[in-house]
Amino acid sequence: MKVSCIFLPTLIADRAIAGRICVVFDVLRASTTIVTALENGCQRIIPVATPAEAQKMKEKLSGSESVLLAGEREGRRIAGFDLGNSPGEFTAERIRGRTIIMCTTNGTAAILGAQGARSVLIGSLANLGAVVRRARVGEDVILLCAGKEGGISLEDIVACGAFVEAMVGEGSGSSGIELDDGAMVALEAFRASRDDIVGVLRKGNHGRYLESIGFGRDLETCAQRDVSDIVPYFDAATGSIEVRVAE
Ligand code: MLT
């Protein structure tokens, strides 16, 4: 079994993702928010690329489903949307039973970009252990970092490294799992910073930006590990992210 890590969605074209499991990581904050929303009982999440597309989708679904618009531009809630992209906004009271149409700058774009894979899973620190357990079935896995506007993101790479370590174990012995260079870089990044994950989130470019616009608390939320057993799947056929009980 092989585990690979792609640091940016724009690099997907260089690799064959068809037929593989792809886990998309946008630790700050889309992945963490998706896990939180599904954990708190939202019906499904429809990722879209633009705010205009979100509005159009809302018009299409409003007769049949109870819809909320969520997402950000430059980290802030999009004008006219119900929710931004802070995990803390997605409380059970607010979102239980609702369909959420979600548009974020990098996270939802990365999810849509991965739809050629056999399964697209959403990974974060919050549900890391659950995603690792799902991935252990033995198929090759590609870890995809959402990054930030074309640049790599430290926290996504470190979270992928945490995933890799959970797959191969803490030792340096053979686990029967083959890592590509990206997965090895991620593993080393995680091992160098494992004792201060919130510090990693604060150090990276996007974390610093989020703190500067008043979302420092989100960094602490997004640094929490294994607080959910949810494994969200993106189904390209329905266009929605849901929790699937079994494959
Ligand atoms: C994104 O998708 O670009 C991020 O989740 C941005 C954010 O922190 O809201």
Image: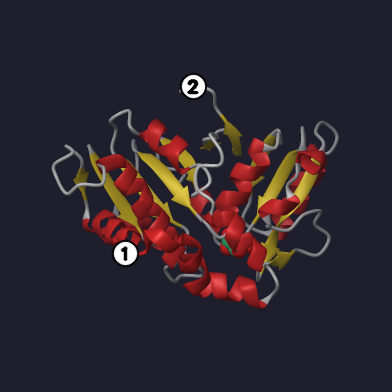
Q: Crowding at label 1, few (<14), some or many (≥20) Cα neighbours within 10 Å?
A: few
Question: Of helix, strand and loop, which one carries label 1?
Answer: helix
Judge whether residue 122 can be spotted in this image: yes
Say which residue appears at 40% left-offset and 43% top-offset: 22
Residue nearest the viewer, comparing 199 with 23: 199
Q: Foreground mark, 1 or 2?
A: 1
Query: What residue would you read off at disc 2?
Result: 246
Task: Measuring from the top left, give residue 56's x and y in whole percent.
Answer: 76, 50
User: Within the displayed image, which quadrant is ligand 1 positioned in?
Assistant: bottom right
Indicate the amino acid at tag 1.
Ala
Q: Position of residue 119 (x, y in %)?
A: 43, 35
Q: Position of residue 76 (x, y in %)?
A: 72, 67
From the image, tell me which residue sits under label 1. Answer: 192
* First of labels 1, 2 by sequence position: 1
Looking at numbered disc 2 in the image, what kind of residue is underneath it? Answer: Ala
For image coordinates 48% across by 68% down, the residue present is 199
